[in-house]
Amino acid sequence: MTTRALIDKLESTQTLSREEFKELLYCDDDRLFERARSAADSVYGKNIYMRGLIEFTSYCKNDCLYCGLRTGNKKALRYRLSKHEILDCCEKGYALGFRTFVLQGGEDTYYNDDIMTEIVREIRATYTDCAITLSTGERGAESYARLRNAGADRYLLRHETANDGHYRSLHPENMSPANRKNCLYELKRLGYQTGCGFMVGSPGQTPDNIVDDLLFIKDLKPQMVGIGPFIPHSDTPFNGEKPGDLRLTLNLLAILRLMQPNLLIPATTALGTIDPTGREQGILAGANVVMPNLSPIEVRDKYLLYDNKICTGDEAAECVNCMRMRIKSIGYELVVSRGDFKNAVAPCPYPTKQAPPRQAASQHR
Ligand code: 5AD
Ligand code: FES
């Protein structure tokens, strides 16, 4: 099939066969980006949503092979933010126009359900017009329920890879791909706007693994999908591995957009790290969210998932202004809004002004 025909098929049926997905994944036809961008525009217009990322703890009990915060990295600098420090970040963020706060951290048992619900409750009470997103890894169903009741609206938990064998090669033995997926289904069941996602080019990832990811996303039907290139961290076992490919990442953003036009898709910091204009290219390929860092400047260079992370020395205000200019330069607008997921509206069966066909009904009388 030609690339054009593949794009048409993906747009009209929201899926492709395994072989067709692989063909589109590795194409170098920029029409894929144009079509994805107009699909995003048709749902979200020229709006790009911003989320204030608060990296509240760099402690992590896990030992994922790719991540700089893994417990085995004894060189990692560790910190925890108090409830008051987190609320200070929200206050600064609100003044800068953020209406979504994302609390992201390693899996740190210090933040048990009592502490975490207290933090969520206080943000909820102070910022009634804001969305609260959590990204604190795998927790139990009851914990997710308590946090939801305390006022959390959304949850980000990347599935990392949908293929069991590949998952096991990226994680220590005590982590299971089934548990990760169960957490995501549970989050959806509890009514969280849920985000999954994966790294592009993580060690051992095959084209078939990526198709597995797309099919898993199709099944989960998340509201958000975060994907960014894998970038090696020098104090992890994946030191020296090659980073994920920019083009492949952009193609994936576009394919996701065409599969589900109303998805919330961030142009990630990792994308901006492998290429100085990566985030702009991400938006032009279909992304519609950016997540500038709201963490206190003193801790930013301690939350290092991978090498050479950008924006570690900038004030939040600088990042927002920088993002606003970058987005404007490509014809889009950074908006002050919660930026909620838009539910698909069923298409009107009578697109023109033509009246419904009455005779058809009368025939059955
Ligand atoms: N390169 C790119 N992304 C990474 N993440 C963790 N380590 C790396 C890395 N080395 C991503 C994971 C995780 C998210 C918070 O950051 O997908 O879910
Ligand atoms: Fe952080 Fe540009 S977005 S400095």
Image (cartoon, grey):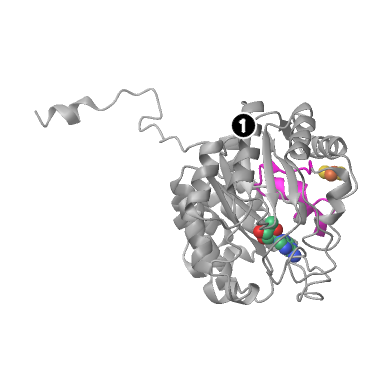
Q: Position of residue 26 (x, y in %)?
A: 64, 66
Residue that protrudes farthest toward the right in the picture: 313
* Residue type of the residue flagged with mark 1: Arg
Residue in view at x 68 percent, y 45 percent: 103
User: Residue 277: x percent and y percent?
Assistant: 82, 50
Q: Is residue 281 visible?
A: no
| Residue at the image point whose x is 14% and y is 27% from the top | 362
- The yes-or-no answer for disc 1 within 8 Å of ligand 1 is no
Name the quadrant of the C terminus.
top left
Q: Residue furthest left?
A: 365
- Residue at horizontal 69%, vertical 57%? 106
**In the image, is residue 132 above or below residue 228?**
above
Mark 1 closeness class: few <14, some 14–19, many ≥20 residues within 10 Å: some
Q: Is residue 99 above or below residue 66?
A: above
Q: Which residue range is magenta in the image?
A: 271-294
What residue is drawn where x is 59% and y is 63%?
A: 24
Work out whether residue 324 can be spotted: yes
Q: Is residue 310 magenta?
A: no
Q: Secondary structure at mark 1?
A: helix
Q: Nearer the viewer, residue 349 or 322?
A: 322
Residue highlighted by disc 1: 124
Q: Quadrant of residue 96?
A: top right
- Residue 303, image x and y in percent? 80, 55
